[in-house]
Every structure is written in structure tokens, then in C-alpha cells.
Amino acid sequence: MTLFGVALRNLSGWQPRNLGALAGITIAVASFVALVGLARGVEHSLLSTLVDRGTDLMVTEAGALDLVSSIVPDARAEDIDEIEGVTRTAPELSRLTSLDDGRSVGVVGWPVGSFPWESLTVVEGRLPAGPDRREVAVGEALAERAGFAMGDEVWLFQTRFEITGVVTAPTVLARSLAYVPLTQAQALTFRDGQATVINVRTDPDRPDEVAGRIRERFPDLAVERAETLASDFMFARIAAVLAYAISTVALVSAGLVIFTAMSTAVAARRGEIAILSAIGWARWRIVSALLIEGTVIAMVAGVAGAAAGVLAAEAVAARPDISGFVAPRIGAALLAQGVGLSLAVGIVGSLLPALSVTRRPPAEVLRGK
Amino acid sequence: MTETLAIRARGLERTFRRGAVRALAGVDIDVPAGASVAITGPSGSGKTTLLHALAGLLPVTAGEVRIGQEVPRTPADWARFRRDHIGLVFQDDWLLRRLSAVENVEIAMQGTHLPPREQRQRALDLLDRVNARAFAHRRPAGLSGGERQRIAVARSLANRPSILLADEPTGELDSFNAEQILRLLFALHGTEGLTLMIVTHDTALAARCALQFRMHDGRGRFSGTEKTE
């Protein structure tokens, strides 16, 4: 009988201590994968929604904390349009409002026919046709969540809009917004002539050069590449901090659970360990057998936990109250981290108690029975 | 004539509870190779502690144990000596519950470089020898106390030890099974030339041994006349 065979035989059957360790590690890894995946999903959704519009530069009020609180005259778009290297501009007004049922929804206003509309793909119907029309295109995630259909009426800013189309976009956040003509958004939020941001498209490979020119001409405005601006704004920073905090908490919690589960499993076997020592097993051989068992448990539980984490994250994201706002972002790297965490802590969690238990003279345990 | 010693111990001391309890208080013992020795004495006199000390299962506070010509000093030395030279039988069988009878014997051969197939064959032969071949593939939970103890004896013989140490090996058995186990141990002692040391309260069993080493308050000495074997 090989050492590996002995270890595997010890794992056979449904022993409570092994099941306890298995369940504990599975839950810990699942929590880690799900929490981190959801947090990263929130962060990624925020960043991608801005970047995927095809905007090279974003012009905002200097010193504004976030995109929604920034105020810029929409006329600046025409001024910026004249700068060399700028190919297209589009002012944008983003606001939050509530639907009939009290749930909040983000509303984005762009000039009809401006380039950001090109980032949306019409699934059904059409985009708002004119600046004076109270028409709205809703993201398909919003439509699904709120039960909207083309031709329905929806109340935004206490005003009736007609849904003329359902659109889709690369990110789940973009699919959860409502899109209206800029003039409508401005009028209904008492922000005539104002925008929160001016989207700028530049000649290819020249955004930094163009950004310099805009800054030079309008020193009271902030000009950043879209991805930089997105990550610098408060919501993105909060999401990033949350992702980091949740990852850390999940990691530490998972580590403690795994360590405790493995330690308990090893400590419960003091009698067996003592008899193996009594019949002449060297300490390293006993420790090796326990390590093999711990590694197998940690591997199985790590894989099961990673799979359970994916399912849990999807289940959380599918809850009606948050559906459409976040898509879990769980890649191979995160899954590998989950399994790796399980293995690392499982091995340490087996090794330390194994070293401790095998340090005790066998007679102490054999007499204590 | 110089007698060959299987075990020679000098000045064995072992204290517990920070010196409050002296389980061994300077025990000297010479065990001739091939002898049968009963370690007797009242409860708490240090019998089991002595046996454990002689097997290296319990480090002594002072003193030295020599096995044959060598003195094991580290836990690793002792593990190797137990594997290669000392068989152990306890009052409880201490079998691993998830392993079959034959596997319980096989695991004692771990680290001996005997190929797995030969380990299996030797384990089956040993089970045959202790009349346990019929339940070689059953787990301990399905066996009687006597059957389990026979497997434990087979395990103790796995690596052809020269010394067999038994701590109340029949303490949890009925009289029939107890007699079976004792006959087995003494037969092995007779046929294999094993040095046999048995901790016991049973005076009848002690009388079957050639030598009696009587413990009292952590001290011991051989008593009575040596019985011709």
C-alpha cells in the first residue's frame, strides 16, 4: 500500500470531519469568488460604460467630484469642435430619477444624431427622432427589469415619455439606462444650456495632443482620456475600493475558515497519528500523509467552491432589485485565485496542526483514550 | 557466560505534572534476548510507563535505553527502531477503522522498501498465522474484539521484530479470546525466539512468563525464580 493510497483510503467514505472541512472550504471559496466577482463587476461596468461610447476625451468641470455633479456649458462643445484634431463633439447630461414604482434609473441626454448614440444598438424600434419629442430609448436590461415594451409610456422627471426603442450596449450598466434627447433632459431638470460632460472624438492617435490644446484654450475645464477620467471619478474609485475591501475581507475570512476546518480535521485524528507513530512511521511520513489528505480536500473543495461562487454571483446579480446593474466579472484568474487560496491555506492548515500533533509523544495520546 | 541482552535500561526516570508525579523513579532493567518477561505491579506503579519508555513512545526525563547494541536518541531513531525491531500490542487494538484487516497490517511496512505486492502477501501470510485470513478484507468495525486483537498482533509482527511489547493485550477480551491471544503470543515467542514483555495484572499470565519484573512506586526489580522455558 503506497503512502498516497493510505491517504486516499483515509478520505474514503462520508466522514463528518472530512465533510465539515469540505463544506467549510467550499463555502469560503464560493464567498470569495462571488464577492470579488460582483465587486469587480460593478467597477468594470462603471468604467466600460464610459469608455465604450467611443469617446476619446471627456471634458468636465474642473474639480468636479463625479460625472453627474459636473456642470459645463453645452456651447463649449461647438467651441471645442473648432480645435485642430477634434473630429466630433457631443455634450451630455446625465441625471438620476425615479420611475413610477420608486426604483431609480439613470437618464442620459445626448443631442439627437450625435456620435454617442452610435454606441447603442437598436434591438427594437428606433432612437428618439427629434429634440422636441418626449421620446426615450431604454436599455434592454432596464426594459426587462421594469417590464417596458416599445410604445409604452414611462414617467421620467415627472413627465410622460414614449418608449420608441429598446437598445443594447456592451456593458450591463449601459443596458440599464434610459436615453433621451439632450434638450429634453436639460429642460426637465432645469439645466438649460448645461451638460455634465462633453464627449470628444479626436483624430486617431492624437488624443493627448488634442487634450493639451483644449486645456490651453479652456483652462477652467478638465480634459482627460475617457478611461482615465472614468477611473478617477468618485463612483469608480468607490467601486474600486469596495472591490479591494471585499476581496480582502473575503480572502481573510476564507483563509480563517479553511485553516480552522483543516486544523480541526487533523486534530480529530490524534489517535490515528499516535498509532502510526507507534508502529514506526517516521514523522515526515505521517505529515506527508496528512498533507496529501489536506491537499486533496482543499483541491476538491476549491474547485467546488469556485463553481458554487459563479452560481452564487449569478444568482445575486439576477435578483429583481439589482438585476441589470451589475454583471459578475469572474474570469479564469479569479477562479484560479479561489482554488489557489484553498490549496495554499489548506496545505498550511494541514501542515501546522500536523507538525504540532506529531510532535507529541504517542504515549500521551494512546494512554488518554 | 555473557548473556545477550535485547533491552538494557539504566536509571529510567519519568515525571509528570512538572515533577509532582514520579512515574518512573530510576528503573534499571536487563532483558535477555528471547526471554519472556511479565511486568507486574499495582495500578499506578509505572508498568505501562515503563513499557512506553522502553518502546520510545514516551521520552524519559532521565536515563537511557539500549536496544540490542544501539541507543536510540531522537524521535526519528525511535520510529525507525519500532518499525524494524519492536512490535507493539496494546490493550485496545488501535486499528485504523477505514482500512481493512490486511491493509492495517500492510501499513506497518511503510518505509521498508518492500514492494507493495510483497507487502500484501506478507500481510496475508501473517493474518493466516494468527487465524485471521478469513476476514482479511473486512474492516475492524465488523469484527469481534478477539478478531481485532489478532489483527493487531499480526500488525506487530509485520517487520519481523525481535522484541514484542504488549500492554495488557487481553484486558478487553473475554476469557476465551484472551486465551487465544495469549497462546498466539507465547507460540510466537517460542517459535520465533521473540523477546516478549507483557504488562499485566493477571498473576496467572505472569506465571507463564519466564521472568517477572515487579513495579512499585516507579521502581522495579525482577522477582521470583526464573522459569525454565
Image (spheres, helix red, strand yellow):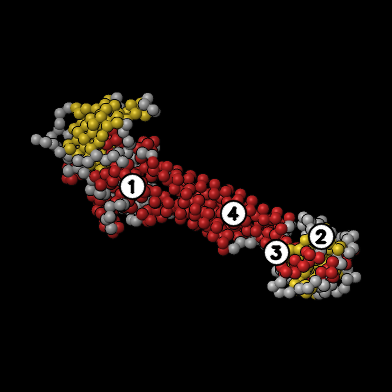
Q: Amino acid at mark 2?
A: Asp
In space, the residues marked 2 and 4 are separated at their CA atoms by 44 Å
In space, the residues marked 3 and 4 are separated at their CA atoms by 27 Å
Label 3 in the same subunit as label 1: yes
- The residue at which mark 1 appears reads as A282
Q: Quadrant of residue B165?
A: top left
Q: Earlier in the sequence, mark 3 or mark 1?
A: 3
Q: Is residue B154 visible?
A: no
Q: Amino acid at mark 3?
A: Glu
From the top left corner, tell me how far across and down residue B167 is, in percent: 29, 37
Label 2 in the same subunit as label 4: yes
Checking the image for residue A220, the label placed there is: 2
Single out the mark in the foreground, 3 or 1: 3
Residue at image point 29% right, 31% down: B62
Q: Residues within 10 Å of mark 3 (few under 14, many from 20)?
A: some
Residue at image point 24% right, 44% down: B85
Checking the image for residue A227, the label placed there is: 3
Q: Quadrant of residue A217?
A: bottom right
Q: Residues within 10 Å of mark 2 (few under 14, many from 20)?
A: few
Secondary structure state at the residue bearing disc 3: helix
Q: Amino acid at mark 1?
A: Ala
Chain of residue at mark 3: A
